[in-house]
């Protein structure tokens, strides 16, 4: 089957819950990644602790959103078809990679908080661990976060290619404001 000629029209649009969970994930991942990349620029002190504390709370929020996405996805079934066999396979692979990376980065982030002995808003301190373990966990957390940023960016570019090059409704299924008028 050729990538340029769909076998049939794309399936229905995603439901509202799926769209909200998708965009909540995208927003949280973006904000958390930017915070993770820039908070170290702040001088040590209360402001830096507060920004890291917000990062931690948003990370725990992302964990809840991911659990909700997985539960919702298991109840709602698989991705709708784009009408292109090769693109559907690629989409399934990319989504699986994104889910694996999301679970990995959140799991490593939670472990990271506990092994660092972090002072949450200087009001409560998580238990700590030895410095070598902290460095090891932090390294893998950063690596997984950067991997998500790269794969998510490619995912977004692919959605734009669907919309502007293939001129199909794949992007509009998750972003109805991109719906084409016929």
Image (cartoon, rainbow, N blue to C red):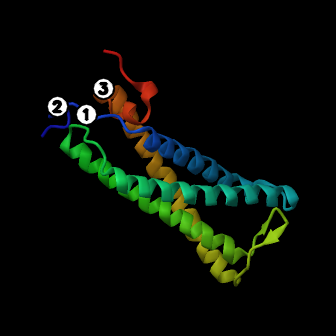
Residue 74 placement (x, y as % from top left) = 36, 57
Q: How crowded is mark 3: few (under 14 residues within 10 Å), some or many (20 or more)?
A: few
Residue under the image location 84 percent in, 55 percent down: 47
The one nearer the camera, 77 or 180, is: 77
Indicate left or right for 124 with 87 as reference: right
Which callout, 2 or 1, points at the residue further toward the start of the chain?
A: 2
Point out which mark residue 10 bears. Answer: 1
Secondary structure state at the residue bearing disc 3: loop
Name the image quarter holding residue 64: bottom right
**Mark pair 3, 1: CA separation:** 11 Å
Q: Residues within 10 Å of mark 2 (few under 14, many from 20)?
A: few
Residue sitting farthest toward the right: 45
Tell us which disc is closer to us: 3 or 1. Answer: 1
Relative to residue 52, is residue 175 depicted above or below?
Answer: above
The one nearer the camera, 73 or 136, is: 73
Secondary structure state at the residue bearing disc 1: loop
Secondary structure state at the residue bearing disc 2: loop
Point out which mark residue 5 bears. Answer: 2
Residue sitting farthest toward the bottom: 130
Residue under the image location 84 percent in, 58 percent down: 43
Residue assigned mark 3: 167
**Mark pair 2, 1: CA separation:** 12 Å
**Mark pair 3, 2: CA separation:** 11 Å
Which callout, 3 or 2, points at the residue further toward the start of the chain?
A: 2
Point out which mark residue 20 bears. Answer: none
Residue 73 showing in the rendered view: yes
Name the image quarter holding residue 1: top left
Residue under the image location 61 percent in, 69 percent down: 110
Residue 37 placement (x, y as % from top left) = 66, 54
Residue 105 placement (x, y as % from top left) = 53, 63
């Amino acid at each position: 089957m050729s990538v340029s000629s769909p076998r049939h029209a794309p399936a229905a649009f995603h439901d509202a819950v799926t769209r909200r969970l998708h965009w909540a994930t995208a927003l949280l991942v973006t904000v958390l990644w930017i915070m993770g990349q820039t908070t170290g620029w702040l001088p040590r002190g209360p402001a830096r602790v507060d920004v890291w504390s917000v990062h931690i709370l948003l990370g725990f929020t992302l964990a809840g959103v991911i659990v909700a996405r997985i539960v919702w996805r298991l109840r709602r079934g698989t991705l709708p078809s784009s009408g292109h066999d090769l693109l559907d396979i690629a989409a399934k692979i990319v989504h699986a990679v994104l889910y694996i990376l999301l679970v990995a980065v959140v799991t490593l982030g939670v472990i990271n908080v506990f092994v660092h002995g972090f002072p949450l808003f200087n009001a409560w301190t998580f238990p700590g661990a030895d410095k070598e373990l902290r460095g090891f966990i932090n390294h893998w957390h950063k690596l997984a976060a950067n991997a998500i940023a790269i794969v998510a960016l490619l995912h977004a570019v692919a959605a734009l290619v669907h919309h502007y090059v293939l001129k199909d409704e794949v992007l509009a299924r998750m972003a109805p404001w991109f719906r084409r008028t016929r």
